[in-house]
């Protein structure tokens, strides 16, 4: 998502913490949202005076943000008065809510969802920001920015850059969970599973349920499971499955061989085929393996998104 405020962007610098809830316009968006989010999460509520659902959601957001006691701020943007900004942020329907931290989008939702979901959203944003850290490194670069850059490098499989970013974070905050998990992913991608596991084992007990940490643990488990599975076994297993389509164990082994060989879509297809044929086989082993893969790849991975949808279709059709 490109964040390019309209106008000349010459809003006055923010000199204090500012109010928890405020109206923000295009000219002040960079200061009051992007820059402010480098120290505290900022939730942006895109609304309009004529929008009925906005009138339902707005007061709920304001109350819950106030109850959060300064751990998050709320910026309200009237899209009628700031149409260019709404277009740049791809706001197509309202109410639309985005959360920013470290100068980047962190999470979001659309529509007037129930209060329980709004609270869960705010809690999730606060927790994610906490794990990313709000400090700076020795050069004064915000920790959240370094983590965002590290994650972006990981997504591009630029493990060298990612490692540099996460290492800088850990020099400033040695128990930063997001950086520990990110660096562990770098080690895992380089084949250094033991180093990755040692890093994850160093995560404080109260943070071990963090999503990034759980993803690394799942990836480590998968790596251990396919350690003895050679990609060259896939052809033999495929022939075995073709000869006996009801041999679910052979199909499961084929999935793991495909995974070991880097064929993630093929592995997903094979596991989904088991679920389709016999969801309860081996105490739901195929479904459990799919969930483990999705967790390891992360919720934003296109194959995770597609795979979850296909799994739901198979299970509930």
Image: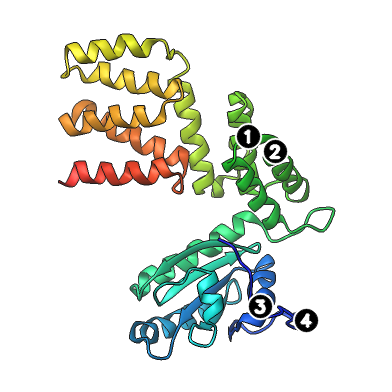
Compared to 306, does 80 lie above or below? below
In the rendered image, residue 87, in percent from the top left (x then y), is placed at 51, 73
Rendered view: 299 above or below 117: above
Check disc 2 and report its element: helix, strand or loop. Answer: helix
Mark 3, secondary structure of its residue: helix
* Camera-nearest residue between 29 and 178: 29
User: Can you say whether 269 is above or below 180 in the image?
Assistant: above
First of labels 4, 3 by sequence position = 4
In the rendered structure, are the residues bearing label 1 and label 2 in contact, judged by CB atoms less than 8 Å apart?
A: yes
Seen at 22% across and 28% down, the residue is 274
Tell me the crowding category of disc 3: few under 14, some 14 to 19, or many 20 or more residues within 10 angstroms, Cα based: many
Q: CA distance from mark 1 to mark 2?
A: 6 Å
- Spatial separation of the CA atoms under disc 3 and disc 1: 34 Å
Residue tagged 1: 186
Front residue (pair 203, 19): 19
Which circle's residue, 1 or 2, is located before the other in the chain? 2
Give the mark nearest the N terminus, 3 or 1. Answer: 3
CA distance for labels 3 and 2: 31 Å
Residue identified by numbered label 2:
163
Mark 3, residue position: 32
Q: Quadrant of the N terminus?
A: bottom right
Instruction: Identify the element where label 1 is drawn.
Output: helix
Residue 124 coordinates in the image, percent (x, y): 49, 61
Whether pointer 4 and pointer 3 mark residues with C-beta atoms closer than 8 Å, the reply is no
Q: Earlier in the sequence, mark 3 or mark 2?
A: 3
Q: How many discs mark residues in the rendered view?
A: 4
> From mark 4 to mark 3, how far is it between C-alphas?
11 Å
Q: Are marks 4 and 2 in contact (CB under 8 Å)?
A: no
Tell me, for residue 15, which label it has, or none: 4
Q: Earlier in the sequence, mark 4 or mark 1?
A: 4
Residue at 64% across, 28% down: 195
Horizontally, is 275 left or right of 161 in the view? Answer: left
């Amino acid at each position: 998502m490109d964040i390019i405020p309209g106008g000349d962007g010459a809003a006055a610098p923010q000199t204090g913490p500012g109010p928890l809830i405020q109206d923000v316009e295009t000219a002040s968006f960079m200061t009051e949202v992007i820059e402010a989010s480098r120290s505290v999460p900022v939730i942006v509520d895109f609304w309009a005076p004529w929008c009925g659902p906005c009138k339902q959601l707005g007061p709920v957001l304001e109350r819950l943000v106030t109850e959060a006691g300064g751990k998050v701020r709320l910026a309200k943007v009237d899209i009628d008065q700031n149409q260019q900004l709404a277009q740049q942020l791809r706001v197509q329907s309202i109410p639309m809510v985005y959360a920013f931290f470290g100068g980047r989008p962190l999470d979001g939702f659309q529509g007037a969802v129930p209060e329980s979901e709004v609270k869960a959203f705010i809690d999730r944003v606060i927790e994610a920001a906490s794990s990313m850290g709000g400090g700076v490194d020795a050069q004064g670069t915000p920790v959240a920015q370094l983590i965002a850059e590290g994650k972006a490098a990981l997504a591009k499989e630029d493990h060298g850059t990612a490692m540099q970013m996460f290492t800088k974070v850990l020099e400033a905050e040695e128990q930063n969970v997001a950086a520990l998990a990110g660096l562990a992913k770098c080690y895992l991608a380089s084949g250094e599973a033991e180093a990755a596991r040692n890093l994850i084992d160093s995560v404080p007990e109260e943070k071990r349920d963090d999503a990034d940490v759980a993803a690394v643990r799942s990836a480590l488990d998968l790596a251990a499971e396919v350690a003895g599975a050679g990609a060259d076994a896939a052809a033999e297993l495929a022939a075995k499955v073709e000869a006996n389509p009801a041999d679910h164990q052979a199909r499961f082994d084929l999935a793991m061989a495909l995974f070991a060989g880097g064929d993630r879509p093929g592995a997903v297809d094979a596991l989904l085929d088991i679920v389709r044929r016999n969801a309860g086989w081996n105490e739901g082993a195929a479904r459990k393996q799919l969930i483990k893969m999705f967790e390891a790849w992360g919720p934003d991975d296109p194959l995770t998104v597609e795979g979850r949808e296909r799994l739901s279709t198979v299970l509930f059709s």
